[in-house]
Each structure stands twice: as C-alpha cells, then as structure tokens.
Image: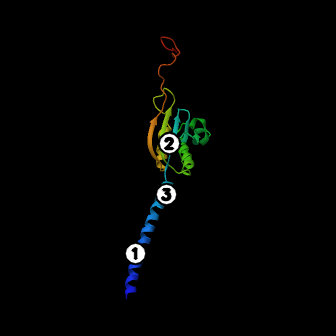
Amino acid sequence: MKEAAENPAKTGEEEKERIEDSAGEDEPEEEKKDKKKKEIEAVVNIYTSFNNTLVHVTDMAGKTIAKVTGGMVTKHGRLKANPTIAMFIAKRISEIIKDLGIKYLYVRIRAKTRNPAPGPGANSIIKSLSREGYKILNILDTTRLPRGGPKKKGGRRGRRP
C-alpha cells in the first residue's frame, strides 16, 4: 500500500514538471512567430501633373520596390492623367507589393512646381490602395514652392498678349 500511495504522488509531481517545461517552451516559439509576422512599411511617392501620373514605391531606406506610370497602363496619351487610369496604376502597384508582405503605407503626393492642387489621379490612387486593404499611416504634400529665385520673364508691367 505504501508503494501505491507513493506512486501517484510521484507521477503527479512528474506531470507538473512536464507541464511547466512545455509551457516554458511554447512562449518563446510564439514570440518568434510574432516577430516573423512583422508587417513591413513602404513609402508611396505619387507625382501627378495634368498630363501624367507617376507612382514610385520605395522601402523606408529609399530603395525602389516598384514604379508604374500612366503610359505603362494605357496607350492613349490623353488618358494618362485620368482618375480611371490611376486606379489601374494602383491595382498594378498593389499586386507587386502584396507579395512582399507590405501592409502599411506612407503617401507623399507631389504636384508640378507652383501648382496649388495635384492632378486628378492622386485621390483615386489613395482611395483604391485603401480599398485593397493597405493601411495608410500618413499623407504628406511635397509640392515644391519657389522662394524668391530668378526674376520672371516679362518686364515691369508683365507679359502682354
């Protein structure tokens, strides 16, 4: 009887040790899995004029991941700055960056120098990228503004027709 009483206690202690050992092993594996699933961020540079739309995707260091223009999507020159063509550009970009595991995007919009507003394709690109499932963290306008610089052509009274 003494042996029977001692055996369950030993097996109970052994089971507790096994459970503790296995619990200790599972936690680091879960942490490793979480580190592997890290979402990657990228920068989407959009240049929109009233004649064309260019999208250039880089990683956070500035290395090029993808580059798509309006001329790569359509053969009609007059449609390159169209919002519909911009949606096709965004779709092609999303196909390229989806394979790399990119989930978060920083967007930089640039218009032609001195233009107060970007071209017609900028808003539709952002909208379609967000529909594809990418989270847009920041939108920044990087349009260049002249500060002083050389004198404009035309003389004192301006250019006359």
Q: At which x and y percent is residue 17?
A: 42, 71
Q: Nearer the viewer, residue 50 or 60?
A: 60
Amino acid at dot 3: Lys
Q: Secondary structure at mark 2?
A: helix
Point 58% across, 39% down: residue: 70
The numbered dot on residue 13 is: 1
Determine which of the numbered discs, if any, sits on residue 125 in the image.
2
Are there few (<14), some (14-19), or many (20+) residues within 10 Å of tag 1?
few
Residue occupying image coordinates x 55% and y 48%: 97
| Front residue (pair 4, 91) | 4
Of mark 2 and mark 3, the one earlier in the sequence is 3
Rendered view: 139 above or below 113? below
Q: Amino acid at mark 2?
A: Ile
Give the structural element (helix, strand or loop) at label 1: helix
Separation of residues labelled 1 and 3 (CA atoms) = 30 Å
Counting from the top left corner in percent of width and height, residue 13 is at 40, 75
Tell me the amino acid under the disc marked 1: Glu
Mark 1 or mark 2, which is nearer the start of the sequence? 1
User: In this rendering, does residue 119 appear at all?
Assistant: no
Q: How is the image coloured?
A: rainbow
Q: Is residue 28 above or below residue 7?
A: above
Residue 78 vertical position relative to residue 157 in the rendered view, above or below:
below
**Residue 129 position in % (x across, y down):** 49, 46
Quarter containing the N terminus: bottom left
Left or right: residue 135 versus residue 68 is: left
